[in-house]
Image (cartoon, rainbow, N blue to C red):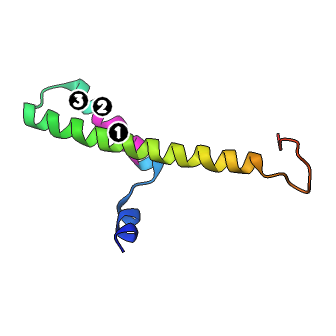
């Protein structure tokens, strides 16, 4: 059941993106201790990886949808 827990704790793409933007803003503002900066940097790396996972999944879903002919028509839906 680790997958259920991981899924429940994984933020949405939008949540991860917004938090990542906040992390970047705080790092750019400065005034943090080295430890605070390192912790924020590590959090930012994790958030960036989460965003990339979401984007890879979206690309895969889009590719699958484009490869699936609808009503026997092989033309792209766009």
Q: Left or right: where does residue 72 sit relative to residue 31?
A: right
Horizontally, residue 20 falls left or right of residue 13, namely left
Percent x, y of residue 29: 22, 25
The reply to whether residue 34 is in sight is yes
User: Which region shows up in magenta?
Assistant: 16-23
Q: Please tell me which residue is depicted at 17% across the width and 25% down the height of the picture.
A: 30
Label 1 environment density (alpha carbons within 10 Å; few <14, some 14–19, many ≥20): many
How much space separates mark 1 and mark 2, taking CA atoms? 6 Å
Instruction: Report the number of numbered marks.
Output: 3
Quarter of the image that includes the N terminus: bottom left
> What residue is disc 1 on?
20
Characterize the local packing of mark 2: few (<14), some (14-19) or many (20 or more) Cα atoms within 10 angstroms: some
Q: Mark 3 = which residue?
A: 27
Question: Does label 1 or label 3 sit earlier along the sequence?
Answer: 1
Q: Residue 33 occupies which quadrant of the picture? A: top left
Give the crowd class for mark 3: few <14, some 14-19, many >=20 residues within 10 Å. some
Q: Position of residue 25 (x, y in %)?
A: 29, 30
As for residue 58 lying within the magenta part, the answer is no
Q: In the rendering, at what x and y percent does residue 10 appear?
A: 38, 57
- Point 32% across, 37% down: residue: 22
């Amino acid at each position: 059941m680790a997958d259920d827990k991981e899924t429940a704790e994984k933020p949405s793409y939008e949540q991860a993106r917004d938090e990542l933007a906040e992390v970047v803003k705080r790092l750019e503002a400065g005034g943090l201790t080295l430890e605070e900066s390192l912790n924020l940097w590590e959090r930012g790396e994790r958030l960036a990886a989460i965003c990339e996972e979401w984007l890879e999944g979206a690309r895969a879903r889009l590719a699958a949808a484009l490869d699936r002919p609808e009503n026997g028509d092989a033309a792209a839906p766009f």
